[in-house]
Amino acid sequence: MKRHSKNMLQGPLFSSIIFYTIPIILTSVLQLLFNAADLVVVGRFCGSLSVAAVGATGSLTNLIVTLFVGLSVGAGVTVAHALGSHEDQVVHRTVHTAIPTALVCGMILTIIGISISEPLLRLMDTPENVLPLSAVYMKIYFAGITFSMVYNFCASILRAAGDTKSPLIFLSIAGVVNVLLNLFYVTVLHMNVAGVALATTISQGISAVLVVIALMRRQDACALKLSKMRLYKPQLMKMLRIGLPAGIQGSLFSVSNVIIQSSVNSFGDTFIAGNAAAANIEGFVYVTINAFSQTAVNFTGQNAGARQYDRVRKILWICLGSVAAVGLGVGLTAYFLGPRLLSIYITDSAEAIAYGLVRLGYICIPYFLCGLMDVSTGALRGLGAAMSPMIISVLGVCGIRIGWISTIFQIPQFHTPECLFFSYTISWAVTFLIQLLAFLLIYRRQVRRYPASDHIQPLCS
């Protein structure tokens, strides 16, 4: 598997960043296709009510899962720093700590998800005709969430080591299986949303097994030996120090999205269906730009670990420029193709398609601002900063959105979908500017604290 790895410490940056990012984009798109296949199949064979049922679970599952997925970010940054400073023993211990951590997180999530999914759906004012199907989907999804945890941790390690192609290959295999199982369970066994949830779970299990095998076959410090798995306290603490704030940030983002979803639910099931389909299309735009954030994390992490600060600075600007161009292009494309794309998901409601197009217009077109925010956040984490990006993002994104919904959105003339979705644009722009300033300040501090001529020692923040 080492043949897939890219050297982040030497060579031209722009081409290396682009070729490293493309497989991440494709991998993330395939991950989204799991859910897209769910929506398309139930939309075509079960109707818009089933689309609403699956869509109503999105923000809630993200709320529960994101906290634990953030720990995989910590694992990746820890590996990247150790690789940059040539600390093979630290890499070995991080890898063998990460997998047991993923298993524990998965078991905890299964218990939590199955136990509280239906009460939370009720708390979000999910319509009564949607709730039973949504609850079934969530319970099956969380029953197999451990597979997703293992995949995310292992893939994070591979990317930190420069390998973005292996996760793409594995998800390609799993994605084909997912689509075939979707069709079988829904059209042959008539299992509705339960069938698509089961298909997604099985597919995630396949990708998890493949990515574990990939780590076991490596010949470098990232090689996994199952018999040596254990929790190494220093590496676990660093993973938690970096990953837990990332997870908390993601969860609090999800809190604001849950609040927004509750506001969406107030417009009725037709609007929920259109919003769910549009959000799924929007997801493809998001993962395209978020891939540059993952690139910024790992390139910055390895070069910060090696004290190559000139490259660290260049990495930020290249990623910012790239994500702005790609985000604007993809966002506009999604909007102008919106009617055709939405009709793939929804075949029985022109009104739902019209509602979906409203969301695409207000979120997809300015989505490049979200990309700028994510890249600056990723670069901060790559430097080893943990609390500052979390605090800035929580106050900037969650604070603005929740404040907007609690005040302006409550005014009768502004109680509209357009006003609701505009809160995204404002929160992205403000948060990006503050994150960029924070990066420049922390970057200068680290250059002074850890000059390149010093003996390389672990980064702290």
Image: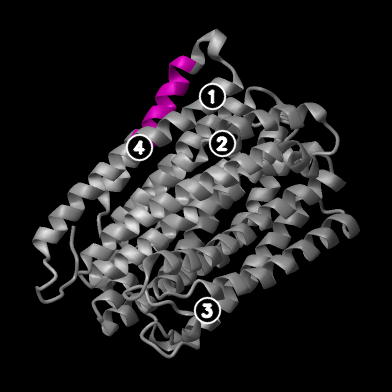
Residue 383 higher or lower than 434, as above or below: below
How far apart are labels 2 and 3 at the CA level? 38 Å
List x then y, in percent, for residue 346.
Answer: 79, 39
Q: Is residue 398 magenta?
A: yes
Mark 4 surroundings within 10 Å by alpha-carbon count, few (fewer than 14), some (14 through 19), many (20 or more): many
Q: Position of residue 39 (x, y in %)?
A: 74, 47
Query: Residue 20: x and y, percent?
Result: 47, 68
Magenta span of residues: 396-408
User: Distance between the Cα atoms at labels 1 and 2?
Assistant: 15 Å
The amino acid type found where label 2 is placed reads Ile
Give the residue drawn at x 54%, y 48%: 286
Secondary element at image label 1: helix
User: Where residue 431 is drawn, which disc sits there?
Assistant: 4
User: Front-most of 366 and 60?
Assistant: 366
The image quadrant that residue 238 belongs to is: bottom left
Q: Amino acid at mark 1?
A: Leu
Helix, strand or loop at label 3? It is helix
- Would you identify the image quadrant in which residue 303 lies? bottom left
- Label 2 Cα crowd, 10 Å radius (few <14 / some 14-19 / many 20+): many
Q: Name the residue that disc number 3 marks.
A: 212
Indicate yes or no whether the magenta region holds residue 261: no
Label 2: which residue?
A: 365
